[in-house]
Amino acid sequence: MASNTPNLGLLKKDPMTDGNETFNIETMLNENWDKIDTAVGQVREGLENVNVDIPDASLTEKGIVQLSSATNGTRENVAATEKAVKAAYDEALAGKQLGVEQKANVVAALNSIGVSASTSETWAQLVAKMAGVIRATGNANPADVLAGKTFSNASGNGLTGTMPNRGAGGSVIPGTINQTKAEGYYSSAITILGDPNLIPGNIRAGVNIFGINGELVEGKRTFSVSGVQVVSSGPVVYDVGFRPGVLMYLHKYEDIPGKISNLTRVVGFYMPNGSFYTASGPSSVGVSEFFGNSVSIYMSATQPGIRENTYDILVYER
């Protein structure tokens, strides 16, 4: 049995009941097409009066959005394409892998300086351990540290010193040439020996030794001594340190009990011809000989009343 559609009223035939009817082109086709055409015309006319304004999308509004494959932009009004998402994913994966590798390096570095660490720890835990590591400071260089000793400074760790170890400092005896102590470390003080005789009076005038100007005027040397000689006690020998030439003898003697006499005389000297002269007198004091760097004096008992001599000797260099 024939029927009509609910919206446009188009004629429909039932194949079971109307199958034997003759197909009517006017009712089955033409009238149906006219109804469709009329309905489409009405829709088009209605659409022409509709004004639809779709805005651009934003973070707060729905709307039209542009696609973008950029992965380094900062815009908030575009949408990422599959290509952009893939690129960002690859970068994140590479960063994750690098982070794993760097964590292993950080853990190894901490363990190498005695700080216990593991890759199973979080970065926050590792950062806290790194912050607790005391950083080396200082400006010592290898040349400032003993050879074989290790140290650290502000620029590096595990540095090795190069300064030679010279052992004990010892003593330096001044001589006629410069003496140089090798550069390096000495475990004890270095003593530069001095001499109490290093004084201006022992240095010839015009000569400077270690900053000390000499004041000694060169000339003949002298020797002086005082003593007491008993009669017939034998000669007294003095080593004067040089070849004697002239001997002055100042003596006091007792020739009369209670009477003291004084006498100064030259008792011996070398003559210009090289012969030696000795003198004697009331005191019976004489020079027995000059030999080498010594002078021998005596007092005999030939003079009555003389018992002892108190004397001062002055010897001049020959």
Image: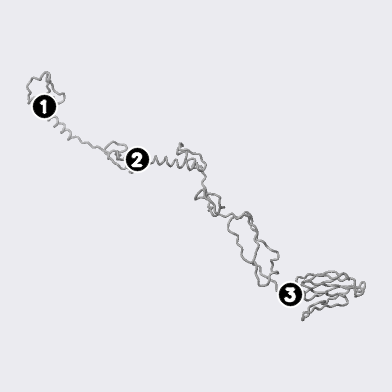
- Residue tagged 2: 90
Q: In front here: 50 or 101?
A: 101
In this view, the mark in front (1 or 2): 2
**Is residue 201 rendered to the left or right of residue 91?**
right
Residue shown at 39% from the left, 40% from the top: 97
Residue type at tag 3: Lys
Residue shown at 19% from the left, 34% from the top: 50
Closer to the chain start, of discs 3 and 2, is 2
Q: CA distance from mark 1 to mark 2?
A: 59 Å
Q: CA distance from mark 3 to mark 2?
A: 108 Å
Closer to the chain start, of discs 1 and 2, is 1
Mark 3, Cα crowd under 10 Å, few <14 / some 14-19 / many 20+, is: few
**Residue 163 location, quadrant:** bottom right
**Residue 64 location, quadrant:** top left
- Residue tagged 3: 220
**Residue 180 location, quadrant:** bottom right
Disc 3 is placed on an element classified as loop
Q: Which mark is residue 32?
A: 1
Measuring from the top left, give residue 30's x and y in whole percent.
8, 27
Q: CA distance from mark 1 to mark 3?
A: 165 Å
In this view, the mark in front (1 or 3): 3
**Is residue 192 rendered to the left or right of residue 157?**
right
Q: Which mark is residue 103?
A: none
**Is residue 90 rendered to the left or right of residue 209?**
left
Measuring from the top left, give residue 76's x and y in whole percent.
32, 40
Q: Is residue 77 above or below residue 266?
A: above
In this view, the mark in front (3 or 2): 3
Measuring from the top left, give residue 236's x and y in whole percent.
83, 70
Disc 1 is placed on an element classified as helix
Measuring from the top left, give residue 257's x and y in whole percent.
93, 72
